[in-house]
C-alpha cells in the first residue's frame, strides 16, 4: 500500500483543485492532489476567464501567463441576448473576459503547482474517506494498487459527481435536468462571416463561436423538440447538423468533430461547504447550466477563499473558527450563481412567444448602462463582498461593515521614497498586507512590524504608502489591513 502524509489532501486535479494546491503550497503548506485521470482531457468545457478570476491570478503574479495564451474580449453575453454586457466599463484592470480553453487554464495551473512543489498524483482515484479529531484518512486505487493518505484537512475538488461529497455524506439538494443541449467542437468549411452567432427563436437556441485554436468552432444548440434526450445518449455529427440547420438554415459545412457532447441544466448546491475537516470547492459544491461561463470562475474563487484560511489555521496564525467563514462567505455566492443560471435558463430556452417577448424586454433594459453594469459586475464577480470580519480586529483597528470584505482593484501605491508598486504586486506572497499612510499618527503606525501583535506580525507584510483612493472611505484613514485575497480586512481611522 502506497502511503502519503500531508497537511492537506485534495481530491481532483481539475482547475479548482490545482488552484487551491497553488495557494497552499505558496504558503509552505504540504499538499497532495489525487487525480483519477492519467492525463488531462484535451477537450475544453470552459472557454473563458472572467475579470475577478484574472484579478486573483494577478494577486499571485501569474495573470500574464494566462493573458499570453488567450484572447481578451471586452464584452460578454447574458443568456445570448442581443445586448451584450459591457465589461470594458467595469472598475478593474481586466475589463474583459479572456477567451482561453479550459485545457490551457489547467495546463498553466498545473505548471505553477509543480513549480511550487505540489505533489500531483495522477491515476489516483479516491474511493474512501474517514475523519476523526486529528485528521482525515483517504483511500483509493492507483497504479501501485492502493493508496492511503493521511492529512489534517481534505478538500473535495473532484467535480460534479464528487466522491468526497458522497463519502462525507454532504447533501446536494436541487433539481434534475429538464433539458439537454448539444455541444460540438467542429471544423466549419463555410464559417459565418460574424465571429460569433447567437439565435434564439421558435426553432431552437444556438450559439456559435470560434474555439480560439484557429481550427474549430464551438456550436451549442438546443432543439425544443428534443429536450428530453438522455444526457448519456451519444451525439452524432448528423444530429448536430440537423439541429443547426433547423435554427440557422445551414450547417456551415460542419465536419471533423473534435468533441461532441450533451449537457443539461441539473442545478444543485451542497448544503454545507464544510463538514469538520472536509471541504468542498468548485463543481463538487455547485452545479448548474453552464450559462455565462461561470462555473470554473466561481470555483477558482472558492479555492482562493479557502486557501489562505487553511494556511492560517495550519500554521497556527489563526483560530480554527476562521475555517467556518469559508462556508459563510462562499455558500451565498454559490446560491447567487444558482439563481443567475436558473434565470438565464429561462431566457435561453424561452422558445414560446412569452419567452421571446421576455428576452426582448430584458435586452432593452440592458441598454440602460446602470442595468448593464449590474449584470456585468455579477458575471465578472466584481460585486462580491463579505461584510463580516473573519477574525477579531487587531488592536487599534476596526471592521466597518461598509468596507470589510470589499475587493480592491489593482492600483499603483506611491510610497514616501518615490517608488510606485502596484497593490496586487504587494500581495504576491499570499500574506495579509498592512498599508500604513506615511506619518499617520496612530497607534498602528509607530513601527512597521511592532504595530501588529504576535501571529498578525508573522502573517502580514507591511508597507508605508498612500492608501488607495477608492473606496473613498479609506482616504481619511491611517492604515488598512488587506486580506490575502485582496479584500479589505480592517482599517485604522
Ligand atoms: C459545456 C460546458 C461549458 C462550460 N463553459 C464554462 C465557461 O465558459 N466558463 C466557466 O467558468 N465554466 C464553464 N463550465 C463549467 C466548468 O467546466 C466547471 O465549472 C469546471 O470544470 C469546474 O472545475 P472543478 O475543478 O471544480 O471540477 P472538474 O473540472 O470537473 O475537475 C474535477 C477533477 O476531479 C477528478 N475526479 C473526479 N472524481 C475523482 C475521484 N474520485 N478521485 C480523484 N479524482 C477525481 C476529475 O477527473 C477531474 O479532473 C462549462 C461546463 C460545461 C459542461
Image (cartoon, rainbow, N blue to C red):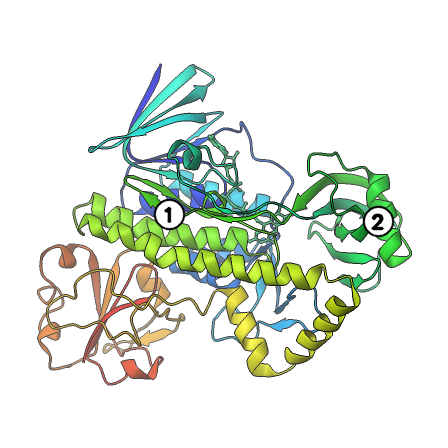
Left or right relative to 242: residue 368? left
In the rendering, which numbered label is found on residue 22? none
Residue 225 percent across, percent down from the top left: 82, 49
What kind of element bears circle 1? loop
Which residue occupies the foreground of this view, 444 or 461? 444
Residue 217 percent across, percent down from the top left: 76, 51
188 is higher (above) or lower (below) than 96: above
Tell me whether circle 1 and circle 2 mark residues in contact (CB < 8 Å).
no
Q: Residue at x 78, y 40 (%)?
A: 257
Question: How far is the residue under mark 1 from the one under mark 2?
Answer: 40 Å
Left or right relative to 234: residue 378? left
Q: Residue at x 28, y 80 (%)?
A: 474
CB of mark 1 near ligand 1 (< 8 Å): no
Rendering quadrant holding ligand 1: top right
Which residue occupies the foreground of this view, 128 or 432? 128
Left or right relative to 447: residue 225? right
Q: Quadrant of the C terminus?
A: bottom left
Q: Quadrant of residue 367?
A: bottom right
36 is higher (above) or lower (below) than 178: above
In the rendering, which numbered label is found on residue 243? 2
Which residue occupies the foreground of this view, 488 or 334? 334
- The residue wearing badge 1 is 272
Left or right relative to 359: residue 420? left
Residue 350 percent across, percent down from the top left: 73, 62
Q: Residue at x 35, y 58 (%)?
A: 329
172 is higher (above) or lower (below) than 73: above
Amino acid at each position: 500500500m502506497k502511503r502519503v502524509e500531508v497537511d492537506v489532501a485534495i481530491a481532483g486535479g481539475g482547475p479548482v483543485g490545482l488552484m487551491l494546491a497553488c495557494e497552499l503550497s505558496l504558503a509552505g503548506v504540504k499538499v497532495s492532489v489525487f487525480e483519477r485521470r492519467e492525463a488531462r482531457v484535451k477537450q475544453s468545457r470552459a472557454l473563458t476567464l472572467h475579470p475577478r478570476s484574472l484579478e486573483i491570478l494577478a494577486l499571485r503574479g501569474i495573470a500574464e501567463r494566462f493573458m499570453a495564451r488567450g484572447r481578451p474580449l471586452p464584452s460578454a453575453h447574458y443568456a445570448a441576448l442581443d445586448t451584450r454586457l459591457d465589461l470594458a466599463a467595469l472598475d478593474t484592470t481586466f475589463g474583459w473576459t479572456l477567451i482561453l480553453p479550459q485545457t490551457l487554464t489547467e495546463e498553466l495551473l498545473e505548471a505553477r503547482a509543480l513549480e511550487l512543489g505540489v505533489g500531483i498524483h495522477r491515476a489516483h482515484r479516491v474511493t474512501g474517506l474517514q475523519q476523526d479529531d486529528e485528521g482525515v484518512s483517504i483511500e483509493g486505487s492507483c497504479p501501485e494498487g492502493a493508496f492511503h493518505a493521511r492529512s489534517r484537512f481534505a478538500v473535495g475538488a473532484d467535480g460534479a459527481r464528487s466522491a468526497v461529497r458522497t463519502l462525507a455524506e454532504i447533501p446536494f439538494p436541487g433539481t434534475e435536468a429538464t433539458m439537454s443541449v448539444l455541444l460540438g467542437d467542429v471544423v466549419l468549411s463555410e464559417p459565418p462571416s460574424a465571429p460569433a452567432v447567437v439565435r434564439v427563436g421558435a426553432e431552437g437556441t444556438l450559439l456559435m463561436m470560434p474555439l480560439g485554436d484557429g481550427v474549430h468552432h464551438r456550436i451549442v444548440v438546443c432543439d425544443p423538440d428534443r429536450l428530453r434526450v438522455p444526457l448519456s445518449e451519444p451525439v452524432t455529427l448528423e444530429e448536430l447538423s440537423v439541429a443547426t440547420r433547423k435554427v440557422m438554415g445551414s450547417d456551415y459545412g460542419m465536419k471533423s468533430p473534435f468533441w461532441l457532447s450533451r449537457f443539461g441544466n441539473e442545478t444543485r448546491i451542497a448544503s454545507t461547504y464544510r463538514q469538520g475537516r472536509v471541504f468542498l470547492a468548485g463543481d463538487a459544491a455547485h452545479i448548474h447550466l453552464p450559462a455565462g461561463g461561470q462555473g470554473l470562475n466561481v470555483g477558482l474563487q472558492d479555492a482562493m477563499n479557502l486557501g489562505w484560511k487553511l494556511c492560517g489555521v495550519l500554521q497556527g496564525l489563526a483560530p480554527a473558527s476562521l475555517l467556518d467563514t469559508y462556508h459563510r462567505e462562499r455558500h451565498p455566492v454559490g446560491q447567487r450563481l444558482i439563481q443567475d443560471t436558473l434565470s438565464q435558463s429561462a431566457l435561453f430556452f424561452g422558445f414560446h412567444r412569452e419567452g421571446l417577448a421576455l428576452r426582448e424586454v430584458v435586452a432593452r433594459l440592458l441598454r440602460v448602462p446602470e442595468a448593464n453594469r449590474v449584470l456585468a459586475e455579477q458575471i465578472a464577480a466584481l460585486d462580491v463582498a463579505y461584510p463580516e470580519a473573519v477574525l477579531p480586529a487587531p488592536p487599534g483597528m476596526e471592521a466597518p461593515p461598509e468596507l470589510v470584505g470589499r475587493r480592491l482593484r489593482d492600483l499603483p501605491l506611491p510610497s514616501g521614497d518615490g517608488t510606485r508598486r502596484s497593490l496586487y504586486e504587494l500581495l504576491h506572497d499570499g500574506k495579509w498586507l498592512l498599508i500604513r499612510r506615511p506619518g499617520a499618527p496612530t497607534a498602528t503606525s509607530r513601527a512597521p512590524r511592532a504595530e501588529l501583535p504576535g501571529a498578525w506580525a508573522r502573517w502580514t507584510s507591511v508597507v508605508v504608502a498612500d492608501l488607495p483612493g477608492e473606496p473613498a472611505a479609506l482616504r481619511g484613514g491611517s492604515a488598512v489591513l488587506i486580506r490575502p485575497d485582496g479584500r479589505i480586512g480592517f482599517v485604522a481611522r
